[in-house]
Image: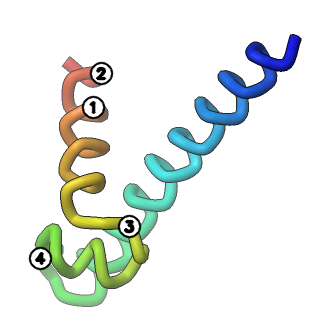
Amino acid sequence: MGEESGGRQQSEAVLAKVSLVHQAREFLTKEKGEAPSLRELSAYTKIPAEEISDILSLVKEQST
């Protein structure tokens, strides 16, 4: 049961980061009038740019 709980917590953490990046992207786009760069998203969310890139790639794959 411990492994199941750990996997669920990890999934929830990933979903939380996806949600945070999505919200940050929408907010910064409204603020600037254009899509933010990875660096701007990273600075805003405190998530490394490489991880944001991975998150955006994952979301893109899931939506196609």
**Residue at horizontal 20%, vertical 56%?**
50
Q: Which of the two labelled residues, at mark 1 and mark 3, occupies the earlier sequence position?
A: 3
**Mark 4 — residue?**
34
Q: How far apart are marks 1 and 3 (CA)?
A: 15 Å
Residue type, label 4? Glu
Residue 29 left/right relative to 10 = left
**Mark 3 — residue?**
47
Which mark, by number, is residue 58? 1
Q: Which of the two labelled residues, at mark 1 and mark 4, occupies the earlier sequence position?
A: 4
Q: Do the residues labelled 1 and 3 touch (CB within 8 Å)?
A: no
- The crowd level at tag 1 (other Cα within 10 Å; few <14, some 14-19, many 20+) is few
What is the tally of numbered marks visible in this picture?
4
Q: Distance between the residues labelled 2 and 4?
A: 24 Å
**Residue at horizontal 19%, vertical 51%?**
53
Q: Which of the two labelled residues, at mark 2 and mark 4, occupies the earlier sequence position?
A: 4
The C terminus - image quarter: top left
Residue type, label 1? Leu
Q: How far apart are marks 4 and 3 (CA)?
A: 20 Å
Q: Closest to the observer: 48 or 36? A: 48
Q: What element carries label 2?
A: helix
**Mark 2 — residue?**
62
Q: What element carries label 4?
A: loop
Instruction: Tell me the quarter of the picture where residue 63 sits.
Output: top left
Q: Are marks 2 and 1 in contact (CB under 8 Å)?
A: yes
